[in-house]
Amino acid sequence: MNKYRPAEIGMALEDVDTPALLLDLDAFEFNIQLMAGFAKKFGINHRPHAKTHKSPVVAQKQIAAGAVGQCCQKVAEAEILVAGGVSDVLVSNQIVGRRKLDRLAGLARNANISVCVDDKDNINQINAAAKRFNAKIDVLVEIDIGAGRCGVVPGKAAVELAQIIAKNSNLTFGGLQAYQGRAQHIRGFGERKIAIEKAGKLVQETIYLLSEAGLECRLVTGAGTGTFQFEADSGIWNELQAGSYCFMDADYGLNLNETGEFIDTFRNSLFIWSTIMSHPTKDRAVIDAGHKATSIESGLPLVADLKDVKYVSASDEHGSLVLGRDAINVNIGQKIRLIPGHCDPTVNLHDWYIGIRNGIVESVWPVEARGAAF
């Protein structure tokens, strides 16, 4: 981790160096409490996805608000979360290879660890690692309910894997991982709802077949920021994995609500703080936030505070702005906020969260799981 910090506690926002990852603490806390209240209303667990924030500090704030734990994608992320005091972690991914499985099993000696599978040989390998460490691991069968990524076909194939899990001495069948990733950014409200209804039928079929085989499906976990209300309302899922809700980004902001308007349930709390470093023409300016400061694979960032100013292209160290006719007070040295296109990979580009409240730096938190891809 870079030892250089772009800000210190007590510093004015204007003095924070750029580019930096800003966290509007009021908006961030509003989002956490809003999701916690939603989960409580529906009597459903919330296990936020740590691949979004990569921070035990954020995780602990979510847990303090009522989250049951965290999920993540990598063993390294799980290790960092457990070291940061998180005692219940689901690795919502397939973990393959003896070294990684030994690390996972070792971690299960110190926390409640769950993992997902979609292959019978992998189940046996997980059990072998658990035996080596005298550990117990909950294993969930991942079913493909429309994402077209990992997961077995719902139904009989999932039951067969669950039966293998149940027969292994150091494993427990924990339930189903059922995440419809492709539905998260379907823009239309009705179309998103239909996608989850179709997914729910596949989950229900699998639960029924598990019951017929004498296997209890204790947990059906999944859902994301784009669809969580549909999974909760279905009565099928009993755990949500929404992660981006705490920050939001420009891409999620394009989803529509039931009335056809852009969703504004959660507030943008995550920003890239940037400096205008060049103003070569009347209608063009350049800032110091490019590919190394913001992810653009899901779309370019939005300029948060300037009227008629648009971020139009990025290079390694530069972001180009087009200034419309109504753009005013755009000057070299001026600092501006950007709303990232995709929060998860943007966070992974930074070492520190700079927490801002009332224009003052209140906190500086490390992005501890940055680059934890192994």
Image (cartoon, rainbow, N blue to C red):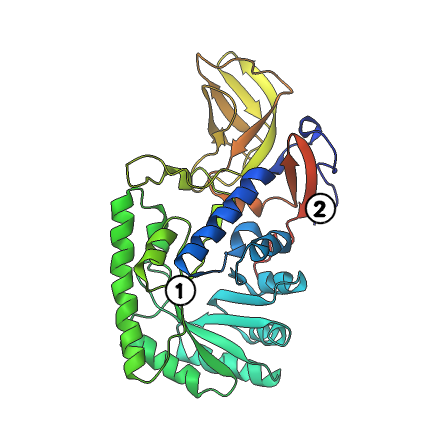
Tell me how far mark 1 sits from mark 2, CA to CA.
Answer: 40 Å
Q: Work out whether residue 131 can be spotted.
A: yes
Which label number is shown at residue 238? 1
* Image quarter of the C terminus: bottom right
Q: Which amino acid does label 2 sit on?
A: Asn
Q: Residue 156 carries which label?
A: none
Q: Does the rendering let one see residue 344?
A: no
Measured from the top left, where is residue 242 in percent x and y? 45, 53
- Mark 1, Cα crowd under 10 Å, few <14 / some 14-19 / many 20+, is some
Which tag, 1 or 2, sits closer to the chain's start? 2
What x and y, as percent, mark residue 316?
56, 35
- Secondary structure under badge 2? loop
Looking at the picture, tell me which residue is in the foreground, 295 or 264: 264
The x, y position of residue 15, in whole percent, is 71, 28
Depth check, front residue: 354 or 182:
354
Tell me the residue at 33%/51% (across/down).
183
Answer above or below: position of 329 versus 372: above
**Residue 265 place in picture, x, y as percent:** 42, 41
Check disc 2 and report the residue beneath it: 2
Q: Which residue is drawn at 32% across and 40% down?
A: 257
Give the mark toward the camera: 1 or 2. 1
Residue displayed at 33% across by 85% down: 214
